[in-house]
Image (cartoon, rainbow, N blue to C red):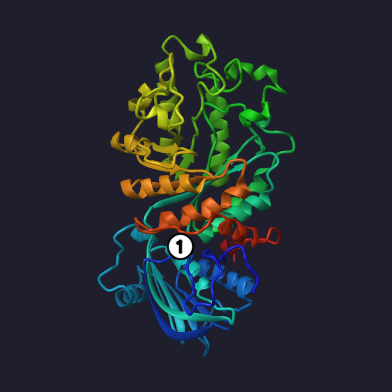
């Protein structure tokens, strides 16, 4: 049996067990002794959305287990039924499999029930995403002999938003991005943020990317892949700091190194947009327009806003600050919010510019860049409460008060760890304890080596509070290295046939 992109063994190798290991582990599992051959099974689905999930199941069964399924009229063999709970058959299934438990107490729109036996399998869910989570679990019940283990499963996630942030740099291979999206789906993530860094061609603002950058037509299949896997696909453009279009260590400025006439759009060092110059909004809004067209329809947009002051030293530019620096910043925040509010899109922003750097409780435990004369933390109260605050910290392994601070201010909060297992455990467990909006795992310029923590964060964000992730780091890394790096599935095609 090949190790595919969507199947991983997440616990250290043990003697063959009678029961399959499912990750993330479901809320409730009751095992039976029944078995069902996967090969030759029919798939039935009443709606087009459920049929699309059936096509995913068909393709994965063939790719992972060399089993041929028939997404059509059932014959004499076993039948896999995909049911939505707004139908009589779906209601009957959940009444049988989860009596008194449905709808789920948390995130009922993402819950599913699953029953497998000798004559077939039933997956019922309130949404296509829930159906996909059930299919994901079903594929993990297949033995090396091609039989599905008998089980009854009732399952739902703890955190409602489980996202993965992926950067596309000019040297990023899109196959690696595809692999990461597939891995996220395998761990039941439901959102992916794609952030191009000078790597996406712009028709309206061609100076904002290198000539050899990817075209929208090359990125669109990744957006459609995520959509086929029932994940929110979220575009991102940093809208204050990081205006160079590159990371700080690159020493490059994608615009000014080639087109110095655009210098007025930026602070003198080029790191941040010049907020007092109204011309920046033509630049930003044109790029927003193109991203929304490429990704649309979308519910969210990540506007960045991190590390705008103090990362490379405060630039003494009174012209870009304006006579009242805080009012200049508040005006910038409102313009961005209003642009997206008119389009019914919710904005996500990094947290760090809204924390005072030397605050005795918050500043010392947070990446925090609010310093005089801007004191951008004082602009927080002008930020509308529907804006989602993304609290990032890549070192803290103990108690971190920052997420609670923003929660008590009335904002939905995401937590963003990176690479370190102790940091991932701390932040995700904080999100679960405080009942925050959820997780946005980051990978930055370490997409490959960050994948073990992406998997761990996915398991933690799905499971109930108190779940212990006792898996050695080396094992996670070894298992992810088994993943294929070529001939990755093109599930976006299931949207069209």
Residue at the extreme bottom: 76
Tell me residue 380's x, y (percent). 36, 27
Residue 154 quadrant: bottom left
Can you say which quadrant of the picture contains the N terminus? bottom right
Q: Residue at x 46, y 38 (%)?
A: 392
Q: Is residue 230 above or below residue 26?
A: above
Residue 14 quadrant: bottom right
In the depicted view, which residue is nearer to us: 306 or 45? 306
Disc 1 is placed on an element classified as: loop
Tell me residue 218's x, y (percent). 67, 48
In the depicted view, which residue is nearer to us: 493 or 80? 80
For the image, the number of numbered tags is 1
Tell me residue 122's x, y (percent). 43, 77
| Residue 190, visible in the rendered structure | no
Q: Residue at x 52, y 25 (%)?
A: 281
Can you say which quadrant of the picture contains the C terminus? bottom right
Q: Is residue 189 above or below residue 44?
A: above
In the depicted view, which residue is nearer to us: 46 or 56? 56
| Residue 263, visible in the rendered structure | yes
Q: Which residue is mark 1?
A: 24
Left or right of 285: which side holds 401?
A: left
Residue at the extreme right: 212
Tell me residue 191's x, y (percent). 48, 51
């Amino acid at each position: 049996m090949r190790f595919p992109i969507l199947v991983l063994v997440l616990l250290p190798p043990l003697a063959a067990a009678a029961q399959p290991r499912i990750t993330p582990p479901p809320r409730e599992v009751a095992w039976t002794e029944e078995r069902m051959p996967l090969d030759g099974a029919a798939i039935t689905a009443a709606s087009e959305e459920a049929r699309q999930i059936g096509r995913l199941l068909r393709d994965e069964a063939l790719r992972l287990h060399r089993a041929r399924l028939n997404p059509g009229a059932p014959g004499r063999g076993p039948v896999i039924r995909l049911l939505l709970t707004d139908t009589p058959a779906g209601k009957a299934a959940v009444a049988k499999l989860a009596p008194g438990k449905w709808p789920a107490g948390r995130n009922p729109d993402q819950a599913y029930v699953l029953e497998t036996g000798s004559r077939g399998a039933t997956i019922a869910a309130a949404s296509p995403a829930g159906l996909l989570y059930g299919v994901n679990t079903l594929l993990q019940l297949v033995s090396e002999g091609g039989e599905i283990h008998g089980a009854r499963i009732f399952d739902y996630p703890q955190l409602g938003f489980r996202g993965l942030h992926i950067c596309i740099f000019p040297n990023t291979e899109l196959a690696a991005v595809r692999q990461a999206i597939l891995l996220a789906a395998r761990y039941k993530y439901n959102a992916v943020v794609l952030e191009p860094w000078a790597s996406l061609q712009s028709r309206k603002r061609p100076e904002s990317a290198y000539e050899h950058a990817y075209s929208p037509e090359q990125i669109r299949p990744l957006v459609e892949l995520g959509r086929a896997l029932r994940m929110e696909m979220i575009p991102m453009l940093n809208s204050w700091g990081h205006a160079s279009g590159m990371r700080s260590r690159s020493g490059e400025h994608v615009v000014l190194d080639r087109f110095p006439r655009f210098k007025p759009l930026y602070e003198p060092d080029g790191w941040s947009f010049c907020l007092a110059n109204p011309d920046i909004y033509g630049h930003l809004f044109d790029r927003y327009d193109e991203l929304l067209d490429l990704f649309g329809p979308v519910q969210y947009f990540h506007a960045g806003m991190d590390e705008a002051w103090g990362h490379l030293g405060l630039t003494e530019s009174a012209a870009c600050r304006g006579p009242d620096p805080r009012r200049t910043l508040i005006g910038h925040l409102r313009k961005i919010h209003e642009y997206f509010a008119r389009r019914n899109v919710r904005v996500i922003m990094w947290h760090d510019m809204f924390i005072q750097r030397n605050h005795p409780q918050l500043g010392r435990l947070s990446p925090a860049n609010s310093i005089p004369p801007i004191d951008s933390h004082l602009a927080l109260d002008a930020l509308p409460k529907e804006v989602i605050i993304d609290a990032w910290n890549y070192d803290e392994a103990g108690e971190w008060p920052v997420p609670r601070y923003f929660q008590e201010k009335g904002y939905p909060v995401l937590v963003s760890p990176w690479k370190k297992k102790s940091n991932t455990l701390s932040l995700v467990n904080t999100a679960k304890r405080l009942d925050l909006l959820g997780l946005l795992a980051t990978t930055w310029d370490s997409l490959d080596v960050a994948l073990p923590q992406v998997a761990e964060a996915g398991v933690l964000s799905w499971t109930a509070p108190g779940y212990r992730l006792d898996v050695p780091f080396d094992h996670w890394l070894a298992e992810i290295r088994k993943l294929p790096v070529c001939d990755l599935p093109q599930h976006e095609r299931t949207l069209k046939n």
